[in-house]
Amino acid sequence: MKRIALSSLAATVAAATLAVSLAGPAQAYQCKGRLTQTEAIHKVRLKSHAAARSFWSAKVKQAYGLPWSMWKIASAKSVSCRHTGAAWYCIARARPCLYVVP
C-alpha cells in the first residue's frame, strides 16, 4: 500500500514539474492607478481611432517615459468614437503598464 502511494506521489510531482517547465517564464506587469485619456478628430473613422491611440502613447511617454507608453500592454483599454457630422471624434483611455522582468 505504501509503495503505491509513493509511486502516485512521485507521478504527481513529476507531472507538476513538467507543467511548470512548459509554462515558460511568468509575465508581470506593473500598472498605473489612473487612466490616461486622449482625443482625436479626423474625417475618416479609422484615422481618428489610430490618432487617438497614437496621442495616448505620446502623452504617456512624456509623463512616465518610453517603457510605459506601449498601448499593447496597457490595461483597461478602450477607444470610443462618434460621428459629429463632418468628422469622427475618438477618445482613447487606458492605464499605462510596464513589463517587469521577474
Image (tube, rainbow, N blue to C red):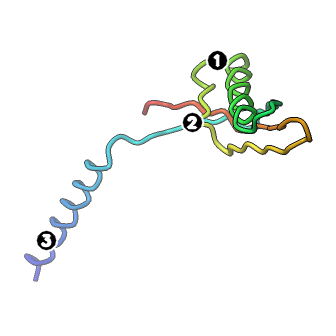
Task: Tell me the tag on residue 6.
Answer: 3
Amino acid type for the residue under numbered disc 2: Lys
Q: Pointers 1 and 3 in contact (CB under 8 A)? A: no
Name the residue located 74 percent from the left edge and 22 percent from the top edge. 59
The residue where tag 2 is placed is 72
| Furthest residue in direction left, as rendered | 3
**Earlier along the polypeptide chain: callout 2 or callout 1?**
1
Q: Give the structural element (helix, strand or loop) at label 2.
A: helix
Q: What is the x, y in percent for residue 75?
A: 64, 42
| Residue density around tag 2, few if under 14, some if 14–19, many if 20 or more, within 10 Å | few
Q: Distance between the residues labelled 2 and 3?
A: 47 Å
Compare residues 18 and 7 and report the one nearer the observer.
18
Q: Is residue 68 left or right of residue 48?
A: left
Q: In this view, does 94 lie to the left or right of 83?
A: left
Where, by quadrant of the figure, is residue 9 drawn?
bottom left
Task: Tell me the tag on residue 65.
Answer: 1
Where, by quadrant of the figure, is residue 71 drawn?
top right
- Discs 2/3, front: 2
| Furthest residue in direction bottom, as rendered | 1
Compare residues 56 and 101 and report the one nearer the observer.
56
**Earlier along the polypeptide chain: callout 2 or callout 3?**
3
Amino acid type for the residue under numbered disc 1: Gly
